[in-house]
Image: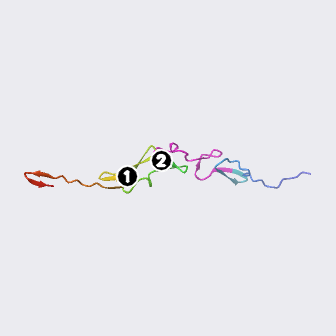
Amino acid sequence: MILIDTVKRNPCSPTPCGPNSVCRQINEQPVCSCVSGFLGAPPTCRPDCTVSSDCPLLEACSNQKCINPCPGSCGFRATCNVVNHNPICSCPSGLTGDPFVQCIPQRKTCLSKFFNNIFVR
């Protein structure tokens, strides 16, 4: 007598995919892919970054993602430039102040002088 195993096995249990990956059964075969937010191919799925040096120079690593570090870094009216993964805040020409708080218009200074006994501003 020959016994035929009619119980279908789940090819994803246990998972053959590795960490940070997901297994889907397609045509009774395991198909592995990295979970959202991870790069590479199973079984070596990895986060976008773990430190800023993993990112391009104009981006920084935040929550394992390479992002533009400028949004929210500088104060009102300040400009932001990224240098070596870091946001650099500065007040544009004509403005002054703490670029991490706010930039305000520069006060114009009046120069007073006497010309031929006439006071000129």
Asked if the stretch drawn in magenta spans residue 37, the answer is yes
Q: Classify 10 Å Cα crowding around label 2: few (below 14), some (14-19), many (20 and above).
A: many
Observer-nearest of 59 and 31: 59
Q: Classify 10 Å Cα crowding around label 1: few (below 14), some (14-19), many (20 and above).
A: many
| Picture coordinates of residue 61, whole percent (x, y) | 51, 48
Q: Which residues are magenta?
A: 31-60
Assign the C terminus to one quadrant of the image: bottom left
Q: Secondary structure under badge 1?
A: loop
Q: Spot the residue most to the left.
A: 116
Q: Secondary structure under badge 2?
A: loop
Q: Residue at x 55, y 45 (%)?
A: 50
Q: Residue at x 51, y 45 (%)?
A: 52
Observer-side mark, 2 or 1, equals: 1
Observer-nearest of 107 and 74: 107
The reply to whether the C-beta atoms of the residues labelled 2 and 1 are less than 8 Å apart is no
Q: Residue at x 11, y 51 (%)?
A: 114
On the image, numbered disc 1 is attached to which residue? 99
Observer-nearest of 87 and 30: 87
Residue 19 horizontal side relative to residue 64, left or right? right
| Picture coordinates of residue 24, whole percent (x, y) | 68, 54
| Coloring scheme used | rainbow
Tag 1: amino acid = Pro
User: Which numbered tag is attached to residue 79?
Assistant: none
Observer-nearest of 66 and 1: 66
Tag 2: amino acid = Glu
Residue 46 horizontal side relative to residue 15, left or right? left
Residue 2 horizontal side relative to residue 91, left or right? right
On the image, numbered disc 2 is attached to which residue? 59
Cα distance, mark 2 to mark 1? Answer: 20 Å
| Picture coordinates of residue 67, whole percent (x, y) | 49, 50
| Picture coordinates of residue 11, whole percent (x, y) | 74, 51
